Image (tube, coloured by chain):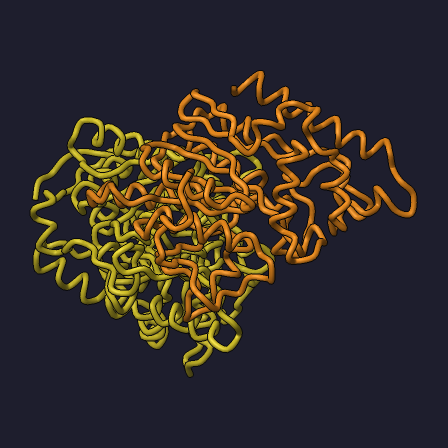
Amino acid sequence: MVATKDMPLKEYVLKGNAACAGCQDMVALRHAHKALEGNVIQVVPACCTSVVQGLWPKSGLGIPVLNTAFPAAAATASGVRAALAAKGKDDTTVMVWAGDGGTFDIGIQALSGAFERRTDFLYVCYNNQVYSNTGTQRSGGTPLHAKTTTTWLGKKEPEKLLDFIVAMHEPVYQATANTAYPRDLYDKFLKAKEIRGPKFIHIFLPCPQAWNYPVEKGVELGKLAVETGYWIQWERVGTEFTLGRQSKRFQDPEKRKPIEEFLKMQGRFSHLFRPERQDAKIQELQDYVQYRWDLLMKTLA
Amino acid sequence: MKTELMSANYAAARAVMSARVEVVPAYPITPATTIPEQIALLNETGQWPGQFIRVESEHSAMFACIGASSTGARTFTATSSNGLLLMDEGLHWATAARLPIVLANINRSISPSWNIHVTHDDSMSKATSGWIQFYVSSVDEFYHTIIQAFKLAEDERVLMPVMVNADGFVLSHTLSTYDYLEPEEVDKFLPPYKPPHWVMDPENPVSHGNIVFPEHYQEFRYAMHEGTHNAMKVYEEVEREYKKLFGKYFGGPIDCYKCDDAEVVFTSQGSVAAEAKDAIDELREEGYKVGNARMRMIRPFPVDRIRELGSRVKGFASLDRSVSYGYGGPVANDIRATMYNTKHRPIIKSYIGGLGGRDMTVPDIKEVILDTVKAVETGETGPEETWHDLR
C-alpha cells in the first residue's frame, strides 16, 4: 500500500468548495485525483458533488468537470470516450463520479448499457445510501430500517445488491473502497487507471447530514462498518478476487463487532434503540451481514 | 458532386460521411432506423471512420452526443417521435450547454395509438427548447440541409443545436435522386469543429454546468435566446456560401413560390409543401391569385419574412400537420402572433390535417386554400382552427 508520504502533493480538490463539514466525498475525491494526477475528464450527474464542486464562475476541482443529468452519467461518459477516441487521445481516464441515487436507481440503465458496450471508463459510485443532496430521501442503496425523509419510520426493504449487478456485466476491474482507508482507496484508483475497459469502484461514504452522527466521526464510522462486517473491502481484476486486507479477519463472524455498535452511532437507526429496543430488527440487520458475506464469497470470490 | 438514387435516410447517413462527423450515438426507432443502420454499415466497412455508439436508449443517445460534443467532436444523431420525447431532458441540456449537435428527426406520430406515419407533433413540441428547426421537402434538401446545419450550429454567433426534420416514410423511405458531395468537397465549406467557447480537456481544465445563482442564470438564458435568434442572419450567409460553392439553394427560411402577386398564401412544413406547388399551379390556371410559402425554418421564426408577406397578402391558409391541443396549429399560431404587431390584418386561418400519415393530396390542399379565398371574399374569419378531412 502506498505510504502517505509517497502520494503526490498536488491537490485537485481545491479550497473553497461548498461541501458540508465532515463530508467524506471530499476525502474520496481528494485521494482519487491524487492517483489520477489530472489526466482525467470527470462526468458528474446530479448528486452532492454537483453542488459541492463550487459555484460558477469558480470551481472547487482542478480537473475538467462535465456536469450532466441525473440518469445520464454513463451515457455522457460514453460520448466523452468516443470523442477522445475520434481525436486519438486515448490516455485520458474518463471517470463518472455518481452518488447512489444516480447509480442504483435513475442511472442504472445507462450504466448497464455502457458496461455492455465495454466502454473504456471508470464508473465510481460514492454511496452514502441516501438522496442526501435533495434532503435525505430513501434510495435503492438505503439499508433496511434506516430512517429517511421518505421512510420516516424506517425503510422496509434492504438495499439493492449493486455490486452483484455490476459484476454480472463482467467489468475488467471492480473494487469496493471506504473513505476510512484513503491509502487503499488511492491504490485502487492507481490500479484502475492502468486497465482499459469498463471499471467500477464502489465507495462506502458516511454522510453526517443523512446518517445523523457528529461530523468528526466519519472515519470511525467507516471503520466500524468494516469491523462489523457490514461493509466488505474487496477487489476483482477480471474474475480474480481478492478480499481486502481490512476485511480479511472479519470473514470470521467471531471476530466481528456486533452490528449494534455501527447502528448506535447513527441517528437514522435511533428508533431501533429508543424509546424501546427493537431486538428483532437489530437481529435482522445482524443476520443480513452474514447473508452478504456468504453471497459474496460464494459468487464472486 | 455526383448523383444517386436513395431514400432520405440513406442520404442522411451519406451526409454524416460528407460532413466528417466524428461521433454518432443512435438508438433504433421506426422510421429513423435506417439512418443508424446505414451509418453502422459505413462504419464497419471503413467508409466512415467516426465513432458509432450503439446506445441503449434515446435518452442515452442524446447524452452521449452531449458528452462527445463537450469533448470537441462533431456529433450527429437521428430519431423519431417517442424517441425524440425520451431525449427531452438532453435536448434542453444541449441548448443550455450550447452544443452544436445536429439531429435528424424523422417526423412520426406520437403514441398512443401506435402509428409510425408522419405527424409533426414530435418536433413541434420542442419549439420552445432553443433547437433551431428546419423542415425539408426532398431527399436532396435533407442531405444538404444536414451539412449546412453543422456550419450554422458551429458558428460562434449561434452555438446552438439544429434539428432537421423530414416526414416519416414520405421522405425517409422513398427513393429519389439527389446530389451528394465527397468529404474533400465539403471541406471547402465546413472546416473541422473547434469549440470557441469551452471544451473538456485535461490540459486546460474547466468545469461546465456548475451551480449558477439567480444573479446570473437569466443572462445565460438570454445568451441562448440570442444564439437561436442569430441563426436567421447566419443561415443567410451559410446559404449564400453554399450556393456559391455547390450551386444548391433551397429558398431561405421560407421558400416562396408564386407569392409575388398572391392574395392568398398557403403555408406548410415538410413534404406537403412540395405537393402544394402543383395545387398552386392548378389554382392559378383556374384564375386564383395564390402562392405557396414553404416554411423551411420555424425556429428561429422568420418574423421579417412573414411580415413582409403579410403586408402584401389578404390571407394566409396555414396548414399544420400538428396541433397545439386546445388552440390551433403551432405554426399558424406563430404567424398570427407575428402579424399582430403590424398595421396589416390579413386573415390568418389555421388548418390541421394530414395527421398520422393521412394523405394531403393536391385536391386536399386546393380545398384548404379555397376555404381561405372564400374567407377573404366574405370577410368571415370562421373558426379558430379548421380540421381538414375530419371524419
Depth check: give the residue in front, B326 or A125: A125
From the top left corner, tell me how far across and down residue B229 is, in percent. 34, 70
Q: In which quadrant will I find the C terminus of chain B?
A: top right
Q: In which quadrant will I find the N terminus of chain B?
A: top left
Name the residue located 39 percent from the left edge and 51 percent from the top edge.
A5
Specify the chain shown as yellow: B
From the top left corner, tell me how far across and down residue A242 is, in percent. 48, 25
Q: Is residue A287 above or below residue B65?
A: above
Q: Is residue B296 above or below residue A101?
A: below
Depth check: give the residue in front, B64 or B20: B64
What is the total number of numbered labels drawn onto the structure image? 0
Depth check: give the residue in front, A283 or B347: A283
Name the residue located 55 percent from the left edge and 64 percent from the top edge.
B382
From the top left corner, tell me how far across and down residue A174 is, in percent. 45, 31
Residue projecting furthest to the top: A298
Depth check: give the residue in front, B185 or A87: A87
- Rendered hue of chain A is orange
Residue projecting furthest to the right: A276
Task: Locate residue B386 relative to residue B261 in the image: left or right.
Answer: right
Name the residue located 26 percent from the left edge and 46 percent from the top edge.
B142
Residue projecting furthest to the bottom: B343
Q: In this view, does B341 lie above or below B337?
A: below
Which corner quadrant of the image does residue A91 belong to? Answer: top left
From the top left corner, tell me how far across and down residue B200 is, in percent. 31, 55
Residue B361 can be seen, yes or no: no
Residue A290 can be seen, yes or no: yes
